[in-house]
Amino acid sequence: MTNQLSAMLGTWQENRDSTEWVLGTVYRTEGSAYRKAGAMMLINGHGQQFGLLSGGCLEADIIRNARRAMVTGKPVMLTYDGTDEDDLSFKLGVGCGGTVHIMLQPLSAANDLGLGDLYEALQKRQSGLYFQKIDAVEGYFEAGVLYGQRPAHIENREDGNWLVTPIQPEPHVLVVGGGLDARPVIGIAHQMGWQTTLVDPRPANARAEHFQAAGTILRKIDGDLATYVTDHKVDAVILMAHSVSIDAAALAVLCDAPIKHLSALGPRHRFRDVLNEAGVSRNDLAFDISSPAGLDIGGQLPESIALSMLSGIHAALFKQSAAPALAQAAE
């Protein structure tokens, strides 16, 4: 199971009545921390954890404290100070050196903190805001489109402080072309917890036995594909059929689709050929385009190219660039 919120909530939903559960959330950090405010994990009565609130350093102690929340039915507030030699996190060898504030909220049949609504929204690929009252057993979810929403933050209200966390479904990528080099693309995307769809009209390609991790395999590139992309809220498309005509056919039907990003495998002049055959002008496309696809990580093997393309899509969808992220990590 991945650490995507939808996967965590899916496990909880299936087993919510068979054992006790606690929701753990990072609500504030100071200095360097592996996870930031809004990070969540679920702990059940069997001592199992789903998700991470640190790099694995604090989870054993968090699980121990979750038992206290289950027994009392009250929230448990934790602080791990990596700068204090007397603090548990320092003794555990936590390397980030920052301070992490965590709240543990017990779940019950009568009060699921709005996680049921949140899970249902993610199943429908809806975004929204999740609200948790700090030092209380209160929470709810409001579905809605996020426009330039700030990261998770604390909102001061008359009735107390609330953590507000933007929620988005995991990315959904459509891969056009089911050749050998598409296998690591589907595999890596699946490992990251992304939704994947593969389309290839050629019978010898995109065979199910070679793409067991693919969520859906389609065989036609026509108007129904555009409908599928809209209905299933596909975020990004990769053109990698190694056929100008197939890539062009896909681009022609998807040129007006509400996707956010398109990556085209191959040199720039090849994508110009795809545009010409599709009868589409690049200036008419409303989504981001990466041609050639991916970030330049110096790889040549299919796995490296897959990593490059998916990294580029990740950067595009989450509005980040690789260079600042690397620079920040090096500090």
Image (spheres, rainbow, N blue to C red):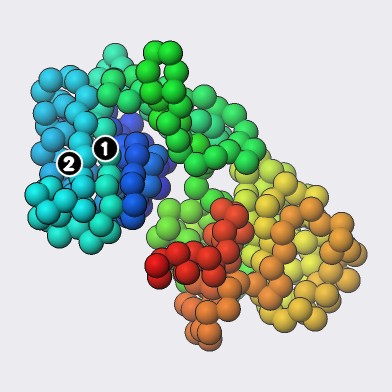
For residue 291, above or below residue 127: below
For residue 80, above or below residue 285: above
Left or right: residue 308 versus residue 28 is: right
The quarter of the image holding the C terminus is bottom left
Seen from the viewer's position, the closer of residues 261 and 87 is 87
Tell me the tag on residue 102: 1
Distance CA(mark 1)–CA(mark 2): 9 Å
Give the residue displayed 84% in from the left and 64% down from the top: 282
The kind of secondary structure element at disc 2 is helix
Give the residue displayed 87% in from the left and 70% down from the top: 277
- Circle 2: is it few (<14), some (14-19), or many (20+) Cα within 10 Å? some
Give the residue displayed 78% in from the left and 74% down from the top: 271
- Circle 1: is it few (<14), some (14-19), or many (20+) Cα within 10 Å? many
Give the residue displayed 34% in from the left and 36% down from the top: 27
Q: Amino acid at mark 1?
A: Ile
For marks 1 and 2, the one nearer the N-term is 2
Is the Cβ of the residue at disc 1 closer than 8 Å to that at disc 2? yes
* Nearer mark to the viewer, of 1 and 2: 1
State the residue position of label 2: 62
Tell me the tag on residue 150: none
**Percent coordinates x, y for residue 316 in the rendering:** 61, 59
**Percent coordinates x, y for residue 109 in the rendering:** 27, 17
**Percent coordinates x, y for residue 125 in the rendering:** 55, 38
For residue 284, above or below residue 312: above
Q: Amino acid at mark 2?
A: Ile
